[in-house]
Amino acid sequence: MRELMVFSGNAHPALAKDICKNLGIELSDAFAGRFSEGEIRVKINENVRGKDVFLVQPTCPPPNDSLMELLIMIDALKRASAYRVTAVIPYFGYARQDRKDQPRVPITAKLVANLLATAGANRVLTMDLHAGQIQGFFDIPVDNLFAVGVFVDYFASLDINDRVIVSPDVGSIKMARAYAKRVAAGLAIIDKRRDSPEKTEVMHILGEVQGKNVIIVDDLIATGSSLTEAVEALKRAKCKKIYAAITHGVLSGPALSRIDSCKDLEELVVTDSIPLGDSSHHPRIKVLSVARLLSEAIKRIHNEESVSSLFD
């Protein structure tokens, strides 16, 4: 069995250390800094020849720096003769442009997939992709884990009755259905029209939410516009308590101020796929760890075991 090694870039070293703690190994040593003019400088400080290497680096803000650092570190590991390099990308950025829905726009998710393969990644491990079809953009194996189990365990501890799982848009229906099935709850969908990438207009709710406790589920929250408008629509529909379970807490721009002003939202539950900084101390934001889920996937990939059970 080849030796397992886990490296981290600068994007989220705390998550990488938690993963290593669950695996019972030390985080391997690598340097990722900058030259004087800002170019990324990388050096792998350990022997990786013939080793099975996992590189933890979500493409979180600043996304360009995180992505470029990831690509350069992959190249360094391959040139150092690593046997296999698996890019562990808990949050896969540039995923929202996954098709040509307007004239003269890129398919950036496909471009990033090509860059990762060209840099030398042999495999990708990610979680709750914005669109499942992005797996098909890669010519290398991709394991897309789901955080549903982590959220379900947490909400089970709250003992919420009369639950309804709510999808904030049509694109999240599959995810919402998976949650509803796991917790034996009802399902509702918010029909909305998007005026711009930052602004939406809620139209109406499909499903019964009156007098129910609802949990809004989605893969990411950026500016918080979709979430706060969904909360307002649900409150008008006379539901009881409103929770949100969102995997990737990007929380950019006015997100925190919108959450502050959205008093009808009981709690926003996110994972630590992205470092939240001061946002993690917000009184209505709960952060759940996905280190155990990722470490289990890493262990199974390293041991050439099936990871399909982790997709449930």
Image (cartoon, helix red, strand yellow):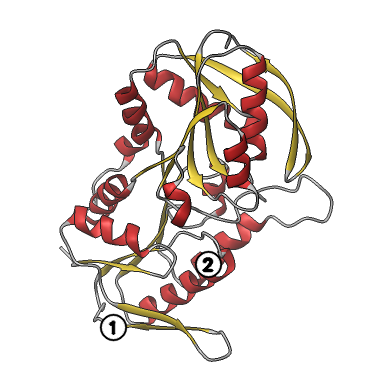
Q: Secondary structure at mark 2?
A: helix
Q: Which residue position is annotated with label 2?
A: 67
**In which quadrant of the rendered image does the N terminus lie?**
bottom left
Residue 47 to residue 279: above or below: below
**In which quadrant of the rendered image does the C terminus lie?**
top left
Inspect this view and state whether residue 96 appears. Answer: yes
Dot 1 amino acid type: Asn
Residue 30 to residue 301: above or below: below
At 73% from the left and 57% from the top, the residue drawn is 106
At 24% from the left and 74% from the top, the residue drawn is 50
Q: How many marks?
A: 2
Q: Position of residue 45 (x, y in %)?
A: 28, 83
Q: Position of residue 35 (x, y in %)?
A: 51, 89
Q: Which residue position is annotated with label 1?
A: 45
Tell which circle, 2 or 1, labels the residue nearer the N-terminal end.
1
Inspect this view and state whether residue 312 appears. Answer: no
Q: Position of residue 46 (x, y in %)?
A: 25, 81
Q: Is residue 237 left or right of residue 280?
A: right
At 67% from the left and 51% from the top, the residue drawn is 97
Q: CA distance from mark 2 to mark 1?
A: 21 Å
Q: Secondary structure at mark 1?
A: loop
> Of all residues shown, which one is farthest toward the right?
103
Dot 2 amino acid type: Leu
Q: Residues within 10 Å of mark 1 (few under 14, many from 20)?
A: few
Q: Nearer the viewer, residue 24 or 312?
A: 24
Instruction: Residue 149: give its label.
Output: none
Residue 130: image quadrant is top right
Residue 161: image quadrant is top left
Residue 262 to residue 248: above or below: above
